[in-house]
Image (cartoon, rainbow, N blue to C red):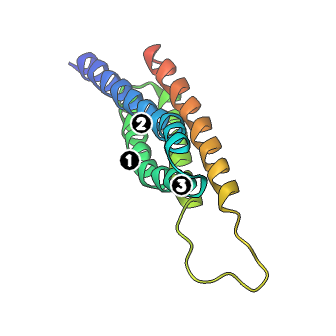
Amino acid sequence: MLDQLQSLSNSAGLIACAAAIGASWVASIASPNCSFDKLTGARADTHVRELLYRTSTPIAGLMLASGALFVLATSWVAGAVALLSAFGFFATRMMLAPKTGKNPKGVRTQRKDQRGYSVMLSLIFTLAAVIAAVLGVFRV
């Protein structure tokens, strides 16, 4: 009975991890390519920042669920890597939080750099999610 529960939770963890990997790939690679092909530069930049901001929380939730399921399946390392990846996706959301208030005089906000760093973070933690999935396959 316990072996079946561990097997089921490991499989569900792999499914959640794969869904997060796919969503992250679409949000950080596929959609920005289409946006910069079809929109003007400023609109595409705004679209990509908003897309990453809106999708990072569900992706982080999927990775949190995946980590919990891996831990339940006693895949300890896969669970730890998945939980680290969940934190990384949520950190991406915090980086892209909408600006409140005005900047002090003479201070400028680099929104393009912010987009670049958030895409980079998203891709790094997508790689961490892939590593978690591979570790989950081998039940490590």
Q: Residues within 10 Å of mark 2 (few under 14, many from 20)?
A: some
Left or right: 61 in relation to 81: left
Q: Position of residue 135 (x, y in %)?
A: 51, 20
The amino acid at mark 3 is: Arg
Question: Residue 49, which numbered label?
Answer: 3
Nearer-the-camera pick, 40 or 18: 40
Query: In the image, which is nearer the foreground, mark 2 or mark 1?
Result: 2
Q: Quick one: label 2 or label 1, which is nearer the N terminus?
A: 2
- Is there a contact, CB below 8 Å, between mark 2 and mark 1? yes
Q: Residues within 10 Å of mark 3 (few under 14, many from 20)?
A: many
Q: Residue at x 61, y 49 (%)?
A: 118
Nearer-the-camera pick, 1 or 100: 100
Q: Residues within 10 Å of mark 1 (few under 14, many from 20)?
A: some
Q: Position of residue 61 (x, y in %)?
A: 39, 46
Q: Quick one: label 3 or label 2, which is nearer the N terminus?
A: 2
The amino acid at mark 1 is: Pro
Q: Position of residue 62 (x, y in %)?
A: 38, 40
Callout 1: helix, strand or loop?
helix
